[in-house]
Image (cartoon, rainbow, N blue to C red):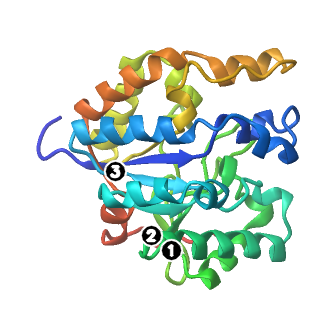
């Protein structure tokens, strides 16, 4: 890339394989405590990988995980990474009313701050589940003391998405920024360019090219995300799931870590708070 490379934001959604929204019909929440939890080993692998590439990142962490693995939270912070909130129990915002959502994000923030001794500034909704039907969630986040959200994916998708939302950082409430997951704009449509299943599906050179378009064409920092279970090809297989869910969840798990290592080498990366909170944001608001 020409000129000074843009620093992008690397983010990890800290949840285990059995907490994925797409698997919710097959794994009742009451079974979570009886499932093999693989989060510690996978996060340790991620911390080592980031350290090898001298990269800091933001870990959007479930309160449910933090409560059971407090030492993992402290390891993340001790390594210089940002600790942020993924809510407590990985319930989509669209499944909660205003009071339930406020309780969820408030308890997660207090727990993470008590364990880390640091302010938790950021929040990401499970499954990017803030959209046109629940923009009241931003009022709850502002009241809870969050400074930014990364909860909108401006694409069309069968489970989430708000395709008409602004593509880049913008203020949604006084003192609260929304930092949408990154998309590339082609043919009058937003295309996913920021991780998750698309990163496992697309050839790596195409994923790299999409991020380059955002850095070079839009001159904007990108936000990339992945989950610890996405580097865990040995995770237990869930029986009886649909072919579509099986394809989405298990596709190319064995290749994810090597692709991430290439990504870490090909771009500059930082924490969400350091990349965005001190940068000027667009003024367009979502009401």
* Mark 1 and mark 3: Cα distance apart in space: 27 Å
Q: CA distance from mark 2 to mark 3?
A: 27 Å
Q: Are marks 2 and 3 in contact (CB under 8 Å)?
A: no
Q: Earlier in the sequence, mark 2 or mark 3?
A: 2
Mark 2 or mark 3, whichever is nearer to me: 2
Does residue 237 appear to the left or right of 286 in the view shown? Answer: right
Marks 2/1: CA–CA distance: 5 Å
- Closer to the camera, 251 or 171? 251
Horizontal side, residue 204 vs residue 133: left or right: left
**Residue 236: x %, y % from top left:** 69, 22
Q: Residue at x 72, y 53 (%)?
A: 90
Q: Which residue is mark 1?
A: 113
Residue 267 image offset from top left, x and y in percent: 25, 37
Q: Is residue 216 visible?
A: yes
Q: Name the residue rendered at 50%, 74% in the picture.
A: 113
- In-front residue for pair 265/167: 265
Labels 1, 3: front one: 1
Instruction: Give x and y (percent) for residue 73.
Output: 47, 58
In the current view of this chain or complex, which residue is farthest to the left?
3
Q: Which residue is mark 3?
A: 221
Question: Residue 80's image quarter?
Answer: bottom left
């Amino acid at each position: 890339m020409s000129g000074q490379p843009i620093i992008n934001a690397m983010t990890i959604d800290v949840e285990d394989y059995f907490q994925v929204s797409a698997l919710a019909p097959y794994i009742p929440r009451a079974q979570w405590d009886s499932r093999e939890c693989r989060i510690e080993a996978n996060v340790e692998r991620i911390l080592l990988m980031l350290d090898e590439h001298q990269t800091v990142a933001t870990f959007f962490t479930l309160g449910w995980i933090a409560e059971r693995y407090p030492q993992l939270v402290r390891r993340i912070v001790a390594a210089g990474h940002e600790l942020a909130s993924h809510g407590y129990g990985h319930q989509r915002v669209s499944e909660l009313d205003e009071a339930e959502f406020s309780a969820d994000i408030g308890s997660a923030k207090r727990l993470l701050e008590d364990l880390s001794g640091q302010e938790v500034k950021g929040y990401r909704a499970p499954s990017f589940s803030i959209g046109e039907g629940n923009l009241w969630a931003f009022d709850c986040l502002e009241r809870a003391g969050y400074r930014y959200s990364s909860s909108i994916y401006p694409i069309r998708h069968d489970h989430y998405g708000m395709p008409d939302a602004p593509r880049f950082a913008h203020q949604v409430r006084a003192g609260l920024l929304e930092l949408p997951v990154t998309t590339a704009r082609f043919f009058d449509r937003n295309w996913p360019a920021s991780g998750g299943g698309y990163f496992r599906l697309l050839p790596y050179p195409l994923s790299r090219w999409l991020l380059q378009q955002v850095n070079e064409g839009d001159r904007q920092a990108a936000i990339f995300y992945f989950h610890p279970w996405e580097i865990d090809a040995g995770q237990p297989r869930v029986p009886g799931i649909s072919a579509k869910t099986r394809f989405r969840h298990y596709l190319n798990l064995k290749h994810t870590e090597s692709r991430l290592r290439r990504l870490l080498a090909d771009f500059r990366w930082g924490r969400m708070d350091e990349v965005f909170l001190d940068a000027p944001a667009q003024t367009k608001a979502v009401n």
